[in-house]
Amino acid sequence: MTDSPWWHPDRHADRRPALLARARLQSAIRRWLDEEGFLEVNPAALQVSPGNETHLHAFATTAIGNDGEPRTMYLHTSPEFAMKKLLAAGETRIAAFAHVWRNRERGARHSPEFTMLEWYRVGQDYTVLMDDCAALMRMAAEAAGVREFRHRGRTCDPFAAPERLSVADAFARAGVDLMSTLTPEGTDRDALARLSPVRVAGDDTWSDIFSRILSEKVEPTLGLDRPTILDRYPVAEAALARPADDPRVAERFELYACGVELANGFGELTDPVEQRRRFGAEMDEKARIYGERYPLDEDLLAALAIMPPASGIALGFDRLVMLATGAPDIDAVMWTPVG
């Protein structure tokens, strides 16, 4: 029945076991969040700014005020901005299952609308989030009744202790001395181009080359046999994270299983001046590449001035279910896939 629409009864019967596993996992995570002292919140999806990262593309709409005047607003690409305002307001441990929207994204691992699990811990180091990730992967396997994750011929043991690997060490495995292309002031594009094991175009930036090496040479090797925590990203690739002890890198990590990125965690940047500078640089690059830019959320920048030190993370819930159930793509584990 693979040619039938997802709502056809026979097709739904085939999809239903994975969907039931999804429901069990969501219930298990909610119990775990409650035991950990988290408050589940429900951030509004309609925002003045959808996020300020170069390659994130939003869905825009027009809101009409009581005065009849139109105003451009956006569906959020993450509940991050709203949740950080709640931290500034005084909340200390919050989580959300949020529907989020990202334009220009459709494929086996991407949907224009998907579910993000995002959570924050005030006063705790970002390494605590790594332990959270290990717990969630075990929960996913138990909810699906499996001992391993599977995706496109790759396997991963979700019960194994994750490998923690720095981005620099991961690039070294690909023959690239990444740290030699970084300085506290920025990046050396030509140095990375010389070291690159992948194609480099004349107009590629340092970030373009970095992303291509990551996707072609590094990511396919991550999360095989056991999960991988890819830690300490270059500051240039961590616009929302605070610098680590080495100012060239930041407190940012990503979680991988079966070569699939599942989560993105940070020691949160709370310096509003530095955050404004980084957002501005991201939007300048967006304007250069795509001819558009998104407004800054001035309320967020004001809130950062009083937000306490915190760590936060976003996990692609649909992807986690996809790996735990061995589903072929993300649509197979969504109750109602985007048409």
Image (spheres, rainbow, N blue to C red):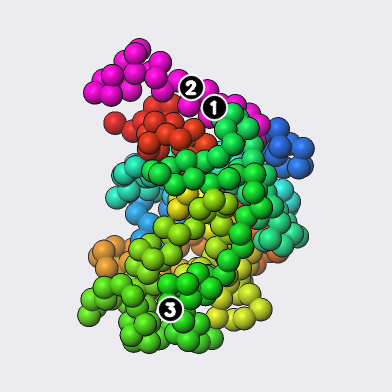
The residue under label 1 is 21
Spatial separation of the CA atoms under disc 3 and disc 1: 41 Å
Q: Residues within 10 Å of mark 2 (few under 14, many from 20)?
A: some
Q: Residue at x 70, y 32 (%)?
A: 31
The residue depicted at 77 percent of the width and 42 percent of the height is 37
Three-letter code for the amino acid on which mark 3 is drawn: Val
Residue type at the position of mark 1: Ala
Label the magenta part by its dominant secondary structure. Answer: helix
Q: Secondary structure at mark 1?
A: helix
Q: Residue tagged by mark 2?
A: 17
Disc 2 from disc 1: Cα separation = 6 Å
Q: Earlier in the sequence, mark 3 or mark 1?
A: 1
Q: Earlier in the sequence, mark 3 or mark 2?
A: 2
Q: Name the residue nearer the viewer: 255 or 309.
A: 255
Q: Does residue 324 appear to the left or right of 335 in the view shown?
A: right
Provide the residue span drawn in magenta. Answer: 1-29
> Measured from the top left, where is residue 159 in percent x and y?
64, 44
> Of circles 3 and 1, which is in front?
3
Occupied quadrant, residue 9: top left
Q: Where in the figure is residue 83, as x and y percent of width and height?
A: 60, 50
In the figure, residue 301 lies in which quadrant?
Answer: bottom right
Instruction: Check disc 2 and report its element: helix, strand or loop.
Output: helix
Q: Is residue 258 above or below residue 39?
A: below
Residue 248 position within the rendered picture, expressed as x and y whole percent measured from the top left = 55, 81
Task: Left or right? Give the position of 288 relative to 150.
Answer: left
Is 319 on the left-hand or right-hand side of 131? left
In the picture, the quarter occupied by the N terminus is top left
Q: Which residue is mark 3?
A: 176
Residue 3 magenta-highlighted: yes
